[in-house]
Image (cartoon, rainbow, N blue to C red):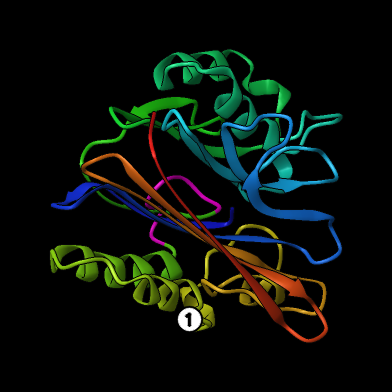
Amino acid sequence: MCIIFFAYKAHPQYKLVFAANRDEIYERPTKSAEFWKDYPNVLAGRDLEKNGTWMGISKRGDFSAITNYRDFSLLIDDPISRGNLVKDYLIKGYSPKTYMEKIKDERQKYNPFNLLVGNTSALYYYSNVDNKIKEIRPGIYGLSNALLDTPWPKIIRGKKRFKEMINSNREIDFSDLYRILFDKWSPKDEELPDTGIGIRRERILSSIFIESPNYGTRASTLLLIDVKNHVTFIEKSLKNISTREWNEVKYEFDII
């Protein structure tokens, strides 16, 4: 993922409301979200190049998502794919805190990342950049390619709209969530972060929804867990790059 907005135990009807965009090179082979044939309890999209995933949930209620941390000076030689961090949590049944402690010990094997792992009882955040495991308290959060709640313009904008929707305490409207995820607004140059990639690329990456000739938002995913542990998972994914045709899948189930 490249941007995530989430409300954790902040809505009277939902334990979790999660809205996220995955940004990636268009040509990278990818499979839309489904229950995996090799791990039938896992619902997630799949990166067919490295066989990992960026976001998913299991029938047990374990869920996880990851974003890259944008600092090219921190890249290492021969890293393990960061998509394995999400996949391994979903298939192996660790508790969230135990898994984060394990990953903290192995942090130097990966390029910089932000990782969220949780279940119906707890949610944790960890980045191998600041190397701190954080238990998430009830509230509303935004995460992109810097540390959690770093005030990049698109995080401030999206989080404000997300917070207004959550704090209204009304039934969640999926179309409202997608309006946030499909927002192409860009800030002024002087408001952009400097992550070492140059102003032209900062502009391209400055919006919540990204479009460029070779790279952009390829999947927009909603994950909701209500107070009765009923899961709703909706993914809109870019099916045809040339025609900008999108595919939508929706899954619902009760956590076992």
Q: How many marks?
A: 1
* Magenta-drawn stretch contains 169: no
Which secondary structure type mostly characterizes the magenta part of the structure?
loop
Callout 1: SS: loop
When the figure is inspected, residue 126 is found, relative to residue 179, above or below; the finding is above
Please give the name of the residue rendered at 60% of the width and 34% of the height, measured from the top-left corner.
Answer: 86
Q: Which residues are magenta?
A: 145-151
Residue 108 percent location from the top left of the image:
68, 22
Q: Is residue 121 left or right of residue 69?
A: left
Residue located at (55% from left, 42% from top): 56
Q: Quadrant of residue 199?
A: bottom right
Q: Which one is nearer the viewer's eye here, 176 or 229?
A: 229
Tell me residue 231's x, y (percent): 38, 47
Name the residue type under label 1: Pro
Q: Say which quarter of the image contains residue 30.
A: bottom right
Q: Nearer the viewer, residue 31 or 220?
A: 31
Label 1 crowd (10 A; few <14 / some 14-19 / many >=20): some
Measured from the top left, where is residue 23 in percent x and y? 66, 62
In the picture, which quadrant includes the C terminus?
A: top left
User: Compared with residue 184, is residue 80 higher up or lower down, i.e. above or below?
Assistant: above
| Image-quadrant location for residue 21 | bottom right
Residue at the spot 41% in from the left edge and 32% down from the top edge: 61
Asked if residue 116 shows in the view, the reply is no
Camera sees residue 235: yes
The residue at which mark 1 appears reads as 187
Tell me where residue 252 appears, x and y as whole percent: 44, 51
